Image: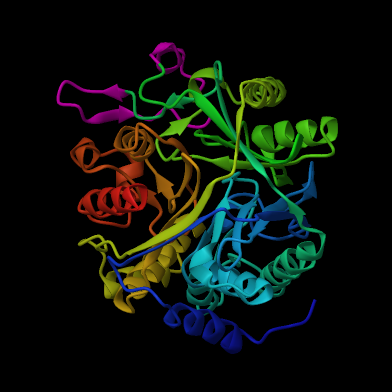
Amino acid sequence: MSTTPRREFLQQSLAAATVWSLLPNSLQAESHRDVSLKLSSFTVDVTPPKGHSLCGGWITPVLDVTDSLQAHGIVLQGAGKPMVIVALDWTALSNGGHLLWRERIASAVDTTPERVAIHCVHQHNAPFACLEAQAIVDAQGDLPHIVMEDYFHDCSQRTAKAARLSMSNAQPVTHIGKGEAKVEKVASNRRIYRDENGVIKAMRGSSCKDPKLRAMTEGTIDPMLKTISFFNQNQRVAAIHYYATHPMSFYGDGLVSSDFVGIARKKLQQEQKDCHHIYFTGAAGNVSAGKYNDGSKPVRAVLAQRILQGMKASLENTSVSPIKTVSWSNVAILPEVRSTFNKEDLNKIISNKDGSVVSRNRPSYMLAWLNRVERKQPIILSSLGINDIATLHLPAESFIEYQLRAQKLAPAKFVATAAYGDGGPWYLPVKEEYPAKGYEVRVAFCEPSVDDVMSTGIKQLLDS
């Protein structure tokens, strides 16, 4: 890997953030009929090296690798400029770094950045990359790195190259399939234990050992795993799966893993080698496996098997139709930064040498978001539409309510939601949840008005 000087590294990310064709609240939509659509797929290993930070630098860094992390993507040609969708086995990819990846891929396949959607699956024994936050902690001199610069650039450049090379092997896709199946005993709402005023008393996390919390109801979830399949006549060549839950069984031990959702996808891929399987995490900001996961190591395999069963059932339930219309839509949004954020205060916390790593690293992400909003780099929501199917590409840790609302907004459409896109704003609660407080609200970087901004953008996409 080549070395990129830190100053050039930051300049690249900030320059990328200023080159944009959409203004906040603007919508772009393009639809095509009677297309000759072609699809190619690619896979890139993005496993971090030993010593690399995991989940932002406040858990044990990489000691070894249990199973590899990968970037999986498809390139669609034949309906305007190419469209690219990528799932990345990282915790998050944020702000200028997210845009830089999309610009590199866009340049490689001759399209525009807003026609590239990159989403993290959100495993925690994985990198949490933000170029601006890295520059902030690097200036302190005593904090562990957030992301190794050479590794970051190598992964993004190899992903862009793989997308470009895949295009020479594109094959026709003549039919599209949609299927869904209920996943049993995986997802449960994290924000379930409240007092008489609705305020959160305790969170049921990715794992939970408290029998009282585990005995409580699943709460608000989307129990359905959805699958979009691409066919070349009768041959299924790619299948994209969507399910909403935090994808961690256990983490923090320094052992890199794609965890139970990644393990399920890999097993399915081994069984069905002629079809490229990709997995996206839906709007799971307030959803995890905590009701069904006590954090013990054997449970990982149990959860993986339940996801695998859901994917197989969704494939079996698929209905197929000829491709008639293909569209791509984007809407740019720029939510308000949390009113409690103050540059001077954040810098004081970050520079406090007596503070813990998490108490200093986390404010660096806050400061990065504050700076981003000041420079007016929007978040892009986007949607791929094929016949009556609509994907919905959302940012960060969007709450499940956004996914459920989208389905109600477009009841005649098969809506499949991927969240954990641009991770800049961290958690994105709905406005009703702000008074309930709790962890997710405490680390949300936007004002409650983000709900109206997001909901309006989602409606614009689905209406288009």
Specify whether residue 348 is in view. Answer: no
Residue nearer the viewer, 1 or 416: 416
At horizontal 33% and vertical 24% (from top left) the residue drawn is 192
Q: How many labels does the image show?
A: 0
Residue 352 falls in image quadrant: bottom left
Left or right: 209, with 426 as reference point? right
Whether the magenta-drawn stretch holds residue 200 is answered as yes
What segment is highlighted magenta in the picture?
193-217
Q: In this view, does 132 lie above or below 254?
A: below
At horizontal 56% and vertical 77% (from top left) the residue drawn is 141
Residue nearer the viewer, 344 or 131: 131
At horizontal 43% and vertical 78% (from top left) the residue drawn is 20
The percent coordinates of residue 14 (x first, y second) are: 48, 81
Residue 222 falls in image quadrant: top left
The percent coordinates of residue 21 (x first, y second) are: 41, 77
The percent coordinates of residue 382 (x first, y second) are: 44, 56
The percent coordinates of residue 405 (x first, y second) are: 31, 36
Look at the image and tell me in which quarter the N terminus lies.
bottom right
Left or right: 414, with 429 as reference point? right
Specify whether residue 75 is in view. Answer: yes
